[in-house]
Amino acid sequence: MFEFEKLSASKLYAAPSVERVVEFSPPGIDMQNISKVLSLAVDARCASVQAYDGYAEVAGRTNFRLTYLDREGAPKGADFNADFSVKAEGDFEASDAASAEITVIETDVEATAVLKLSAVLSVSVCAVRREEFSALVDAQNCYKTTKEIYLPSFIAAKTSASPFDSEQDAGGEVSQVLSMSSACVLKRAEAVQDGVRCEAKVVATVTYVEGGEIRQRDFAVDLEEDLGLEGVLPSDAVKVQACVKSAKLVLQGVTDDNVLRIEGEAGFRIQVFRCAAQSVVADLFDLDNETFIQTETQNGVCFDGSGYFVEKAGGTAILGDNRASAIAVSAIPYAHAVTTKAQTEQDGTLSVEGIVNADIIYTDENGFNSIRAEIPFSLSIVGQPPFSQEVCVLCQVQNISAEVRREREFDIDMTLAVGVNGYSPIQFSYISDVQLGEEKAKNTSGVSLYIARDGDQLLDLCKALTAMPDDILAQNPTLQFPLVEGERVVFFRRLEA
């Protein structure tokens, strides 16, 4: 009589972000050979995430790239790695599929008796959990109403790696490579039949010394990935995390005419979600027996999809009065964006605020010097369709440039790559159990009058009049639902002698 079906929904859970301070003192550093630190570039990536009951463990690696002047005033570069781990507490279960995003919030370098490099990381852990439940999907020999509920589902996941390479003329002989920074910027990600198509760009900056001058070369390598994932539909939502897994610089060419060649591998972690409609029984009425219905309600989050945008921004950095006037900008070896606020406005536009931290190496009357610039930015982005109620935004510096203005100011122009993931909270209810009770007492009145409440439906009349819908509508063919407050419904009952 009652047909129940096992349904499943995937729940998205995000634990509160955890801050982790990574400190590292490289061994074997002669501090007497460091006269001035010009730049400290830092990035961090996740190596593994494992969920347990009540918490998740994240392991990762932080890369420190130090640019400095030695005791003779010559620019030098050094590269260090430091592993870290962090524990994120939350409503995790050991069976969850967990992932983490790591953002560098702050960096610092202390060059006194020993060299101490530090970075403050923000670690956000998300998990996908599949839950099953039994819902009433059909009922026989009684009057029922149905409705559609929307169930978020985790469809598929896949990791992929894509090699990249590019080269440029250095314009002379490279005497010292100071640093190389790189990032993978997503341009598009969409579901196709039985697969996912991604477009990305690896952007890299190489800072080096040629002819006694600090120079910089910017690289941009376009990537395309077509990944097969059985069961994926074009209407599904795709979430992608991209990173540079490895990158190295190779010097080629001949003496006095070097070629800078970058080689590496970009990594992609792809997840596919679907929010599908499912028909279930909303309510039912049995003419002969009492029915006892148990209803359950669940809350969830539906992943709506991603959007990728390129926005211009800019600002000004000013030298302090205790510094000599700047002559020219040599390089910007490090630029990192931190998103401080992101929200969807009532008109559907996306408002994003943040700060770009950039190390500007320049020359003054004393030689090479540097300044850490903090450039606030505010973006207003219009998307089609409008952005979701809840958004998670990642801003990356795609390119940046600066020039000296009036000796003590730097005009800074930059292009930001903005990635947006949208989420919508959902709630659905269903009948989890039905029990038949005692046989109903027969209504022996020849006529019944029902005074409607606002919003009453046909099922409400059936329950109140103890009658089937066809009989009620046959006597009241002009009824229109939902009923309005005070509307009268008369039902004549044929009684047996």
Image (cartoon, rainbow, N blue to C red):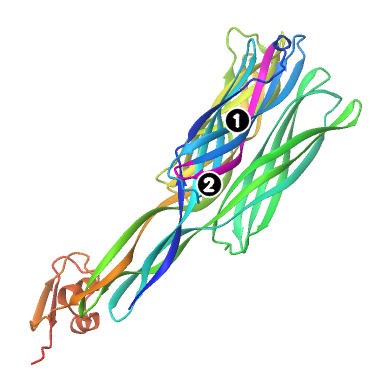
Q: Position of residue 411 (x, y in %)?
A: 62, 23
Q: Which residue is mark 2?
A: 98
Q: Which residue is mark 1?
A: 336
Q: Which mark is residue 253?
A: none
Secondary structure mainly formed by the magenta segment: strand
Amino acid at dot 1: His
Q: Position of residue 173 (x, y in %)?
A: 86, 24
The verdict on residue 374 being magenta is no
| Region of the chain picked out in magenta, as a range | 36-55
In the rendered structure, which disc, 2 or 1, sits on the residue that comes first in sequence? 2
* Drawn side of residue 82 relative to residue 465, left or right: right
In the displayed structure, 472 sits above or below 344; it is below
Per the image, label 1 sits on a secondary structure element best described as strand
- In the picture as drawn, the residue positioned furthest to the right comes out as 254
Q: Position of residue 276 (x, y in %)?
A: 47, 63
Can residue 148 be seen here?
A: no
The verdict on residue 40 being magenta is yes
Q: Position of residue 280 (x, y in %)?
A: 37, 69
Amino acid at dot 2: Ala
Can residue 32 be seen here?
A: yes
